[in-house]
Image (spheres, helix red, strand yellow):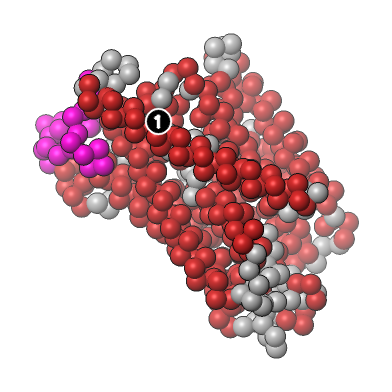
Amino acid sequence: RGMKMQSLQYAVVVFSLISIGLSHGLVYNKFDAALRHGAMGDGRACPHISDPMRSPRIKKGSLRGGGSGQGGSALVGVQGGFDSNMVELMLGLCKSLIGGTVLILSGGLAQVTNAPWMSAPAGALCMLFAIFSAHTYSLLGLCCQMLHANSYTELWSKTVSPKTAWMPNTACFTFTWLCCAMYTIIIRDMLRSLLLAIGMAEAWTSKESVCAMMVLLLLPLCLLRSLSSLAYTSFFGMLGCLYTTGFAIYRHVKGDYAKGGRFFQLLALERRPKFGDEINISKLLVLISYFHGCYQVHFDAPKFFHSLSPSTLRRFNVLTYSSFTIAGLVGAGLMIAGFLTFGEHSESLLLNNYHSNDQLATWARLATLVSILCSYPLFFGGFASGIIELTADILRSSDRQTVKDVLAFVMVAVNVSLAFVLERLGIIASLRCGARGTDQAS
Protein backbone atom coordinates (compact mmCIF):
# COMPACT_ATOMS: atom_id res chain seq x y z
CA ARG A 1 0.00 0.00 0.00
CA GLY A 2 2.90 2.34 0.84
CA MET A 3 4.49 1.73 -2.56
CA LYS A 4 1.21 2.53 -4.30
CA MET A 5 0.87 5.81 -2.38
CA GLN A 6 4.46 6.77 -3.21
CA SER A 7 3.95 5.96 -6.90
CA LEU A 8 0.79 8.08 -6.94
CA GLN A 9 2.66 11.01 -5.38
CA TYR A 10 5.44 10.74 -7.98
CA ALA A 11 2.91 10.54 -10.81
CA VAL A 12 1.10 13.64 -9.54
CA VAL A 13 4.33 15.66 -9.34
CA VAL A 14 5.59 14.61 -12.79
CA PHE A 15 2.19 15.30 -14.37
CA SER A 16 2.13 18.72 -12.68
CA LEU A 17 5.57 19.69 -14.00
CA ILE A 18 4.69 18.60 -17.55
CA SER A 19 1.40 20.52 -17.37
CA ILE A 20 3.16 23.66 -16.15
CA GLY A 21 5.58 23.51 -19.09
CA LEU A 22 2.79 23.01 -21.60
CA SER A 23 0.75 25.85 -20.09
CA HIS A 24 3.71 28.24 -20.27
CA GLY A 25 4.22 27.32 -23.91
CA LEU A 26 0.56 27.84 -24.79
CA VAL A 27 0.40 31.22 -23.07
CA TYR A 28 3.58 32.63 -24.58
CA ASN A 29 2.76 31.32 -28.05
CA LYS A 30 -0.63 33.03 -27.85
CA PHE A 31 0.90 36.31 -26.65
CA ASP A 32 3.61 36.18 -29.28
CA ALA A 33 1.10 35.66 -32.08
CA ALA A 34 -1.16 38.39 -30.68
CA LEU A 35 1.66 40.90 -30.43
CA ARG A 36 2.75 40.18 -34.02
CA HIS A 37 -0.77 40.52 -35.47
CA GLY A 38 -1.96 43.29 -33.14
CA ALA A 39 -5.15 41.55 -32.01
CA MET A 40 -6.22 38.99 -29.44
CA GLY A 41 -8.40 35.99 -30.06
CA ASP A 42 -11.59 37.89 -29.33
CA GLY A 43 -10.92 40.48 -32.01
CA ARG A 44 -9.90 43.34 -29.72
CA ALA A 45 -6.74 45.27 -30.37
CA CYS A 46 -3.80 44.05 -28.38
CA PRO A 47 -1.96 46.61 -26.23
CA HIS A 48 1.42 47.36 -27.81
CA ILE A 49 3.98 46.50 -25.18
CA SER A 50 7.54 46.17 -26.44
CA ASP A 51 8.50 44.04 -23.48
CA PRO A 52 5.60 41.99 -22.07
CA MET A 53 7.33 41.72 -18.69
CA ARG A 54 7.24 45.50 -18.18
CA SER A 55 4.14 47.56 -17.64
CA PRO A 56 3.38 50.36 -20.10
CA ARG A 57 4.28 53.92 -19.11
CA ILE A 58 1.60 55.42 -16.87
CA LYS A 59 0.50 58.92 -17.74
CA LYS A 60 -1.04 61.32 -15.31
CA GLY A 61 -4.82 61.09 -15.39
CA SER A 62 -4.85 57.84 -17.39
CA LEU A 63 -5.11 55.44 -14.48
CA ARG A 64 -8.19 53.28 -14.13
CA GLY A 65 -10.72 54.87 -11.82
CA GLY A 66 -8.73 58.11 -11.71
CA GLY A 67 -10.41 60.76 -13.82
CA SER A 68 -8.97 64.17 -14.51
CA GLY A 69 -9.29 65.10 -10.87
CA GLN A 70 -7.78 61.89 -9.47
CA GLY A 71 -4.86 61.20 -11.74
CA GLY A 72 -2.29 63.00 -9.60
CA SER A 73 -3.19 61.25 -6.34
CA ALA A 74 -3.40 57.89 -8.04
CA LEU A 75 0.03 58.38 -9.53
CA VAL A 76 1.43 59.13 -6.09
CA GLY A 77 -0.07 55.82 -4.90
CA VAL A 78 1.72 53.97 -7.69
CA GLN A 79 5.05 55.64 -7.04
CA GLY A 80 4.76 55.32 -3.26
CA GLY A 81 4.07 51.59 -3.55
CA PHE A 82 2.58 50.86 -0.11
CA ASP A 83 -0.69 52.36 1.07
CA SER A 84 -3.67 51.13 3.08
CA ASN A 85 -5.14 49.33 0.07
CA MET A 86 -1.83 47.59 -0.62
CA VAL A 87 -1.28 46.58 3.02
CA GLU A 88 -4.81 45.18 3.33
CA LEU A 89 -4.42 43.07 0.20
CA MET A 90 -0.93 41.97 1.24
CA LEU A 91 -2.29 40.66 4.54
CA GLY A 92 -4.98 38.75 2.68
CA LEU A 93 -2.56 37.28 0.14
CA CYS A 94 -0.01 36.32 2.83
CA LYS A 95 -2.75 34.62 4.84
CA SER A 96 -3.89 32.67 1.77
CA LEU A 97 -0.30 31.65 0.99
CA ILE A 98 0.75 30.57 4.48
CA GLY A 99 -2.43 28.92 5.75
CA GLY A 100 -1.85 25.48 7.26
CA THR A 101 0.23 24.08 4.42
CA VAL A 102 3.56 25.22 5.88
CA LEU A 103 2.98 22.89 8.83
CA ILE A 104 3.66 19.84 6.63
CA LEU A 105 7.08 20.94 5.34
CA SER A 106 9.12 19.59 8.27
CA GLY A 107 7.52 16.19 7.81
CA GLY A 108 8.28 16.33 4.09
CA LEU A 109 11.95 17.11 4.77
CA ALA A 110 12.09 14.26 7.32
CA GLN A 111 11.06 11.85 4.55
CA VAL A 112 14.10 12.91 2.53
CA THR A 113 16.78 13.01 5.22
CA ASN A 114 17.63 12.99 8.91
CA ALA A 115 20.83 15.01 8.44
CA PRO A 116 20.63 18.45 10.12
CA TRP A 117 22.88 20.11 7.51
CA MET A 118 20.27 19.38 4.82
CA SER A 119 17.94 21.95 6.37
CA ALA A 120 19.94 24.80 4.79
CA PRO A 121 19.62 23.67 1.13
CA ALA A 122 16.00 22.71 1.80
CA GLY A 123 15.30 26.23 3.07
CA ALA A 124 16.95 27.69 -0.02
CA LEU A 125 14.83 25.41 -2.24
CA CYS A 126 11.72 26.53 -0.38
CA MET A 127 12.57 30.18 -1.12
CA LEU A 128 13.31 29.31 -4.76
CA PHE A 129 9.84 27.86 -5.18
CA ALA A 130 8.36 30.98 -3.56
CA ILE A 131 10.13 33.16 -6.14
CA PHE A 132 9.13 30.88 -9.02
CA SER A 133 5.50 30.93 -7.87
CA ALA A 134 5.62 34.73 -7.50
CA HIS A 135 6.80 34.95 -11.11
CA THR A 136 3.92 32.85 -12.42
CA TYR A 137 1.47 34.79 -10.22
CA SER A 138 2.86 38.02 -11.71
CA LEU A 139 2.28 36.63 -15.21
CA LEU A 140 -1.41 36.33 -14.40
CA GLY A 141 -1.44 40.02 -13.48
CA LEU A 142 0.17 40.75 -16.85
CA CYS A 143 -2.59 38.74 -18.53
CA CYS A 144 -5.27 40.65 -16.63
CA GLN A 145 -3.78 43.96 -17.75
CA MET A 146 -3.32 43.00 -21.40
CA LEU A 147 -6.64 41.19 -21.87
CA HIS A 148 -8.87 43.05 -19.39
CA ALA A 149 -9.86 39.68 -17.92
CA ASN A 150 -11.72 39.51 -14.62
CA SER A 151 -11.52 35.81 -13.77
CA TYR A 152 -9.21 32.83 -14.09
CA THR A 153 -11.56 31.09 -16.53
CA GLU A 154 -11.77 34.21 -18.68
CA LEU A 155 -7.98 34.37 -18.84
CA TRP A 156 -7.85 30.81 -20.17
CA SER A 157 -10.54 31.56 -22.74
CA LYS A 158 -8.58 34.51 -24.10
CA THR A 159 -5.11 32.95 -24.02
CA VAL A 160 -5.77 29.32 -24.94
CA SER A 161 -9.31 28.54 -26.12
CA PRO A 162 -12.89 29.12 -24.93
CA LYS A 163 -13.62 25.48 -25.78
CA THR A 164 -11.33 24.25 -23.04
CA ALA A 165 -12.19 26.90 -20.44
CA TRP A 166 -13.74 24.18 -18.31
CA MET A 167 -10.29 22.71 -17.63
CA PRO A 168 -8.87 25.43 -15.32
CA ASN A 169 -12.27 25.80 -13.68
CA THR A 170 -12.30 22.07 -12.91
CA ALA A 171 -8.74 22.25 -11.58
CA CYS A 172 -9.66 25.25 -9.40
CA PHE A 173 -12.67 23.68 -7.72
CA THR A 174 -10.78 20.39 -7.30
CA PHE A 175 -7.93 22.30 -5.67
CA THR A 176 -10.24 24.19 -3.30
CA TRP A 177 -11.99 20.95 -2.33
CA LEU A 178 -8.63 19.31 -1.56
CA CYS A 179 -7.66 22.40 0.48
CA CYS A 180 -10.82 21.95 2.53
CA ALA A 181 -10.08 18.22 2.91
CA MET A 182 -6.56 18.98 4.12
CA TYR A 183 -7.80 21.69 6.47
CA THR A 184 -10.40 19.26 7.88
CA ILE A 185 -7.64 16.83 8.88
CA ILE A 186 -5.64 19.68 10.45
CA ILE A 187 -8.74 20.85 12.36
CA ARG A 188 -9.25 17.27 13.61
CA ASP A 189 -5.71 17.08 14.98
CA MET A 190 -5.75 20.59 16.48
CA LEU A 191 -9.14 20.06 18.11
CA ARG A 192 -8.13 16.73 19.64
CA SER A 193 -4.84 18.16 20.94
CA LEU A 194 -6.64 21.11 22.51
CA LEU A 195 -9.17 18.82 24.21
CA LEU A 196 -6.33 16.71 25.62
CA ALA A 197 -4.50 19.85 26.79
CA ILE A 198 -7.47 21.02 28.86
CA GLY A 199 -7.89 17.56 30.39
CA MET A 200 -11.10 16.40 28.70
CA ALA A 201 -12.17 12.78 29.28
CA GLU A 202 -11.20 10.14 26.71
CA ALA A 203 -14.78 9.90 25.45
CA TRP A 204 -14.58 13.53 24.28
CA THR A 205 -11.21 13.07 22.58
CA SER A 206 -12.12 9.95 20.59
CA LYS A 207 -12.10 10.22 16.81
CA GLU A 208 -15.89 9.85 16.65
CA SER A 209 -16.51 12.69 19.12
CA VAL A 210 -14.01 15.00 17.41
CA CYS A 211 -15.55 14.36 13.97
CA ALA A 212 -19.02 15.13 15.36
CA MET A 213 -17.68 18.43 16.75
CA MET A 214 -16.15 19.25 13.36
CA VAL A 215 -19.53 18.88 11.66
CA LEU A 216 -21.02 21.36 14.18
CA LEU A 217 -18.15 23.78 13.51
CA LEU A 218 -17.79 23.52 9.73
CA LEU A 219 -21.38 23.24 8.51
CA PRO A 220 -22.53 26.66 9.85
CA LEU A 221 -19.41 28.27 8.35
CA CYS A 222 -20.11 26.78 4.91
CA LEU A 223 -23.78 27.85 5.10
CA LEU A 224 -22.94 31.52 5.74
CA ARG A 225 -24.87 33.78 3.38
CA SER A 226 -22.23 36.52 3.58
CA LEU A 227 -18.52 36.37 4.33
CA SER A 228 -18.35 40.02 5.39
CA SER A 229 -17.99 38.92 9.03
CA LEU A 230 -14.68 37.28 8.05
CA ALA A 231 -13.33 40.37 6.33
CA TYR A 232 -10.96 41.28 9.17
CA THR A 233 -9.61 37.80 9.91
CA SER A 234 -6.55 38.16 7.66
CA PHE A 235 -4.70 40.27 10.24
CA PHE A 236 -5.40 37.86 13.09
CA GLY A 237 -4.68 34.88 10.83
CA MET A 238 -1.27 36.34 9.99
CA LEU A 239 -0.58 36.94 13.69
CA GLY A 240 -1.40 33.29 14.36
CA CYS A 241 0.96 32.09 11.62
CA LEU A 242 3.77 34.34 12.84
CA TYR A 243 3.22 33.22 16.44
CA THR A 244 3.45 29.55 15.43
CA THR A 245 6.68 30.20 13.51
CA GLY A 246 8.17 32.16 16.39
CA PHE A 247 7.13 29.44 18.84
CA ALA A 248 8.83 26.69 16.78
CA ILE A 249 12.05 28.73 16.52
CA TYR A 250 11.95 29.52 20.26
CA ARG A 251 11.57 25.85 21.25
CA HIS A 252 14.46 24.85 18.99
CA VAL A 253 16.79 27.57 20.24
CA LYS A 254 16.03 26.76 23.90
CA GLY A 255 16.49 23.03 23.28
CA ASP A 256 13.35 22.10 25.25
CA TYR A 257 12.83 18.97 23.13
CA ALA A 258 16.50 18.02 22.79
CA LYS A 259 18.08 15.36 25.02
CA GLY A 260 18.10 16.70 28.55
CA GLY A 261 15.52 19.34 27.66
CA ARG A 262 12.35 20.18 29.52
CA PHE A 263 9.98 18.02 27.43
CA PHE A 264 12.37 15.31 26.18
CA GLN A 265 11.47 12.70 28.80
CA LEU A 266 7.74 13.33 28.35
CA LEU A 267 7.86 12.25 24.69
CA ALA A 268 7.27 8.64 23.63
CA LEU A 269 10.40 6.90 22.32
CA GLU A 270 9.14 6.96 18.72
CA ARG A 271 8.57 10.74 18.95
CA ARG A 272 11.90 11.80 20.42
CA PRO A 273 14.30 13.72 18.14
CA LYS A 274 16.45 11.50 15.94
CA PHE A 275 19.22 12.62 13.60
CA GLY A 276 21.77 10.93 11.37
CA ASP A 277 23.38 11.29 7.96
CA GLU A 278 20.92 9.39 5.75
CA ILE A 279 19.51 10.89 2.55
CA ASN A 280 16.68 9.29 0.56
CA ILE A 281 16.79 10.92 -2.86
CA SER A 282 13.74 8.93 -4.01
CA LYS A 283 11.59 11.00 -1.63
CA LEU A 284 12.84 14.35 -2.96
CA LEU A 285 9.93 14.66 -5.41
CA VAL A 286 7.49 14.43 -2.50
CA LEU A 287 9.18 17.38 -0.76
CA ILE A 288 9.21 19.31 -4.04
CA SER A 289 5.49 18.70 -4.42
CA TYR A 290 4.97 20.16 -0.93
CA PHE A 291 7.01 23.26 -1.82
CA HIS A 292 5.04 23.63 -5.03
CA GLY A 293 1.72 23.33 -3.21
CA CYS A 294 2.60 25.85 -0.51
CA TYR A 295 2.39 28.86 -2.82
CA GLN A 296 -0.49 27.93 -5.09
CA VAL A 297 -3.23 30.56 -4.76
CA HIS A 298 -3.14 31.52 -8.43
CA PHE A 299 -6.89 31.14 -8.94
CA ASP A 300 -7.27 34.36 -6.90
CA ALA A 301 -4.80 36.43 -8.97
CA PRO A 302 -7.46 38.26 -11.07
CA LYS A 303 -9.38 39.17 -7.91
CA PHE A 304 -6.29 40.62 -6.23
CA PHE A 305 -5.25 42.46 -9.40
CA HIS A 306 -8.59 44.19 -9.80
CA SER A 307 -8.84 44.89 -6.05
CA LEU A 308 -5.79 47.15 -6.28
CA SER A 309 -6.57 50.84 -6.58
CA PRO A 310 -5.26 51.69 -9.10
CA SER A 311 -4.79 48.23 -10.64
CA THR A 312 -1.46 48.50 -12.45
CA LEU A 313 1.15 45.86 -13.13
CA ARG A 314 3.78 47.72 -11.09
CA ARG A 315 1.61 47.76 -7.98
CA PHE A 316 0.58 44.17 -8.55
CA ASN A 317 4.24 43.10 -8.74
CA VAL A 318 4.99 44.92 -5.47
CA LEU A 319 2.06 43.10 -3.86
CA THR A 320 3.06 39.76 -5.37
CA TYR A 321 6.78 39.66 -4.65
CA SER A 322 6.42 41.14 -1.16
CA SER A 323 3.73 38.63 -0.15
CA PHE A 324 5.48 35.61 -1.65
CA THR A 325 8.78 36.62 -0.02
CA ILE A 326 7.12 36.85 3.40
CA ALA A 327 5.40 33.50 2.83
CA GLY A 328 8.69 31.93 1.71
CA LEU A 329 10.53 33.16 4.80
CA VAL A 330 7.77 31.91 7.13
CA GLY A 331 7.62 28.53 5.36
CA ALA A 332 11.39 28.05 5.35
CA GLY A 333 11.74 29.22 8.96
CA LEU A 334 9.00 26.93 10.25
CA MET A 335 10.31 23.95 8.26
CA ILE A 336 13.91 24.40 9.44
CA ALA A 337 12.97 25.01 13.09
CA GLY A 338 10.65 21.99 13.18
CA PHE A 339 13.11 19.67 11.45
CA LEU A 340 16.08 20.73 13.61
CA THR A 341 13.92 20.10 16.68
CA PHE A 342 12.61 16.61 15.84
CA GLY A 343 14.66 15.42 12.86
CA GLU A 344 13.55 12.10 11.38
CA HIS A 345 10.54 11.93 13.70
CA SER A 346 8.97 15.17 12.42
CA GLU A 347 5.26 14.48 11.92
CA SER A 348 3.33 15.21 8.74
CA LEU A 349 1.63 17.94 10.80
CA LEU A 350 4.36 19.65 12.82
CA LEU A 351 2.27 20.73 15.82
CA ASN A 352 1.48 17.05 16.53
CA ASN A 353 5.12 16.65 17.63
CA TYR A 354 4.81 18.98 20.60
CA HIS A 355 3.68 17.56 23.93
CA SER A 356 0.20 18.32 25.24
CA ASN A 357 1.75 19.79 28.43
CA ASP A 358 3.54 22.44 26.38
CA GLN A 359 1.39 25.52 27.01
CA LEU A 360 3.01 27.54 24.22
CA ALA A 361 2.18 24.70 21.81
CA THR A 362 -1.43 24.79 23.03
CA TRP A 363 -1.65 28.47 22.11
CA ALA A 364 -0.06 27.69 18.72
CA ARG A 365 -2.69 24.99 18.10
CA LEU A 366 -5.47 27.38 19.08
CA ALA A 367 -4.10 30.11 16.78
CA THR A 368 -3.84 27.60 13.92
CA LEU A 369 -7.35 26.27 14.54
CA VAL A 370 -8.93 29.74 14.52
CA SER A 371 -6.94 30.77 11.44
CA ILE A 372 -7.98 27.69 9.47
CA LEU A 373 -11.61 27.88 10.56
CA CYS A 374 -11.77 31.46 9.24
CA SER A 375 -10.21 30.36 5.93
CA TYR A 376 -12.44 27.32 5.48
CA PRO A 377 -15.57 29.10 4.15
CA LEU A 378 -13.41 31.08 1.70
CA PHE A 379 -12.07 27.89 0.11
CA PHE A 380 -15.54 26.35 0.19
CA GLY A 381 -16.84 29.44 -1.63
CA GLY A 382 -14.24 28.87 -4.35
CA PHE A 383 -15.29 25.25 -4.66
CA ALA A 384 -19.01 26.06 -4.83
CA SER A 385 -18.47 28.91 -7.31
CA GLY A 386 -16.51 26.58 -9.59
CA ILE A 387 -19.28 23.98 -9.59
CA ILE A 388 -21.96 26.61 -10.17
CA GLU A 389 -19.97 28.21 -13.00
CA LEU A 390 -19.59 24.84 -14.74
CA THR A 391 -23.34 24.25 -14.51
CA ALA A 392 -24.40 27.85 -15.18
CA ASP A 393 -26.16 26.91 -18.43
CA ILE A 394 -28.62 24.58 -16.70
CA LEU A 395 -29.12 26.49 -13.43
CA ARG A 396 -31.55 29.31 -12.83
CA SER A 397 -30.41 32.22 -10.71
CA SER A 398 -32.85 31.27 -7.97
CA ASP A 399 -31.38 27.76 -7.78
CA ARG A 400 -27.79 28.77 -7.13
CA GLN A 401 -28.06 29.33 -3.38
CA THR A 402 -29.88 26.01 -3.02
CA VAL A 403 -27.10 24.25 -4.93
CA LYS A 404 -24.50 25.94 -2.73
CA ASP A 405 -26.29 24.79 0.43
CA VAL A 406 -26.46 21.20 -0.86
CA LEU A 407 -22.76 21.34 -1.72
CA ALA A 408 -22.03 22.52 1.84
CA PHE A 409 -23.67 19.41 3.30
CA VAL A 410 -21.94 17.13 0.78
CA MET A 411 -18.47 18.65 1.25
CA VAL A 412 -18.62 18.59 5.05
CA ALA A 413 -19.86 14.99 5.04
CA VAL A 414 -17.16 13.81 2.59
CA ASN A 415 -14.29 15.70 4.23
CA VAL A 416 -15.19 14.67 7.78
CA SER A 417 -15.41 11.07 6.56
CA LEU A 418 -11.92 11.42 5.06
CA ALA A 419 -10.67 12.87 8.35
CA PHE A 420 -12.14 9.85 10.14
CA VAL A 421 -10.38 7.40 7.82
CA LEU A 422 -7.06 9.08 6.99
CA GLU A 423 -4.38 9.40 9.64
CA ARG A 424 -1.84 11.53 7.75
CA LEU A 425 -1.89 14.52 5.42
CA GLY A 426 0.62 13.19 2.86
CA ILE A 427 -1.64 11.88 0.10
CA ILE A 428 -4.13 14.79 0.34
CA ALA A 429 -1.28 17.31 0.25
CA SER A 430 0.27 15.69 -2.84
CA LEU A 431 -3.05 15.54 -4.69
CA ARG A 432 -3.68 19.18 -3.78
CA CYS A 433 -0.33 20.17 -5.30
CA GLY A 434 -1.12 18.26 -8.48
CA ALA A 435 -4.56 19.79 -8.91
CA ARG A 436 -3.06 23.26 -8.71
CA GLY A 437 -0.07 22.48 -10.87
CA THR A 438 -2.07 21.38 -13.90
CA ASP A 439 -3.00 24.93 -14.79
CA GLN A 440 -0.65 27.08 -12.70
CA ALA A 441 0.80 29.10 -15.56
CA SER A 442 -2.39 29.70 -17.47
Q: Which residue occupies the extreme right position in the image?
A: 203
Q: Is residue 69 magenta?
A: yes
Secondary structure found at label 1 = helix
Q: Is residue 289 magenta?
A: no
Residue at the spot x=41%, y=51% of the render? 132
Residue at the spot x=73%, y=48% of the render? 5
The answer to whether residue 101 is visible is no
Q: Quadrant of the C terminus?
A: top left
Query: In the picture shown, does residue 98 fall above or below 20?
Result: below
Query: In the picture shown, does residue 155 fall above or below 326?
Result: above
- Lateral position of residue 197 relative to residue 89, left or right: right
Query: In the picture shown, does residue 404 fall above or below 373?
Result: above
Residue at the spot x=51%, y=39% of the render? 18
Residue wearing tag 1:
26
- Lateral position of residue 245 relative to residue 70, left or right: right
Give how far across and how far down residue 305 sits, in percent.
Answer: 35, 38
| Residue range of the region highlighted in magenta in the rendering | 45-73
Categorize mark 1 by other alpha carbons within 10 Å: few (<14), some (14-19), many (20+). some
Residue at the spot x=22%, y=25% of the render? 36
Give how far across and how far down residue 373 sits, in percent.
Answer: 61, 48
Give how far across and how far down residue 317 sits, in percent.
Answer: 30, 47
Q: Magenta-highlighted stretch: main secondary structure?
A: loop
* Amino acid on which the number 1 mark rests in the picture: Leu
Q: Which residue occupies the extreme bottom position in the image?
A: 260
